[in-house]
Amino acid sequence: MKKFMLLIAGLGVAAAAVPASAAPAFQGGWQNINARQDRIEQRINQGIRSGALSRREATQIRNEYRSLVRMEARYRASRPGLTPQERRDLDRRYDALSAKVRYEKHDRNNHRR
């Protein structure tokens, strides 16, 4: 029993020693900003290819996306860097953009059909 407890304790210590960079991008309810950006870009491109997004819709969404990328760059360039409040602001804005992509892709105005 004592060996078993030592084994469990050793595994716990080993698991705690794994660096955070080796962890997946999505954990604990939040995602890496770069992963979110990539996912949104992929969804826009897929919507264009499938015909679910018109050229006008895609242009409008991409413009909003680019403004968020510029805003993130400004936040990171500011003196303390990306603060938790700025991170929450970006998360909220990316959530809204993601919802807009979802809405536009499923608004049943199939552009190729």
Image (cartoon, rainbow, N blue to C red):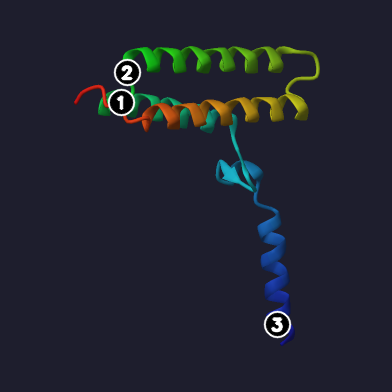
Q: CA distance from mark 3 to mark 2?
A: 64 Å
- How many residues crowd around disc 3 within 10 Å: few (fewer than 14), some, or many (20 or more)? few
| Secondary structure type for disc 1 | loop
Q: Nearer the viewer, residue 48 or 12?
A: 48
Residue at the front extreme, as displayed: 108
Q: Quadrant of residue 105?
A: top left
Q: Please give the name of the residue rendered at 63% of the width and 45% of the height, measured from the top-left corner.
A: 29
Is there a contact, CB below 8 Å, between mark 1 and mark 2? Answer: yes
Q: Are dots 3 and 2 in contact, CB under 8 Å?
A: no
Numbered disc total: 3
Tell me where residue 106 appears, x and y as whole percent. Answer: 37, 33
The residue labelled by disc 1 is 109
Which comes before the other along the chain, label 1 or label 2? 2
Asked if the residue under mark 1 is in contact with the one under mark 3, i.e. CB atoms within 8 Å, the reply is no
Q: Which amino acid lies under the numbered mark 3 shown in the image of this protein?
A: Lys
The tag earlier along the polypeptide, 3 or 2, is 3
Q: CA distance from mark 1 to mark 2?
A: 9 Å
Q: Position of residue 28 (x, y in %)?
A: 65, 48
Question: Is residue 27 or residue 23 the one in the foreground?
Answer: 27
Q: Relative to residue 8, is residue 100 drawn left or right? A: left
Quadrant in which the N terminus appears = bottom right
> From the viewer's perspective, is 46 left or right of 97?
left
Q: Which mark is residue 13?
A: none
Of circles 1 and 2, the one toward us is: 1
Question: Is label 2 in a helix, a strand or a loop?
Answer: loop
Badge 2 is on which residue? 54
Check the picture and name the quadrant holding the C terminus.
Answer: top left
Give the amino acid type for the residue marked by disc 1 in the picture: Asn
Q: What amino acid is labelled 2 in the image?
A: Ser
Q: Which mark is residue 3?
A: 3
Q: Earlier in the sequence, mark 3 or mark 1?
A: 3
Q: Is residue 19 left or right of residue 107?
A: right
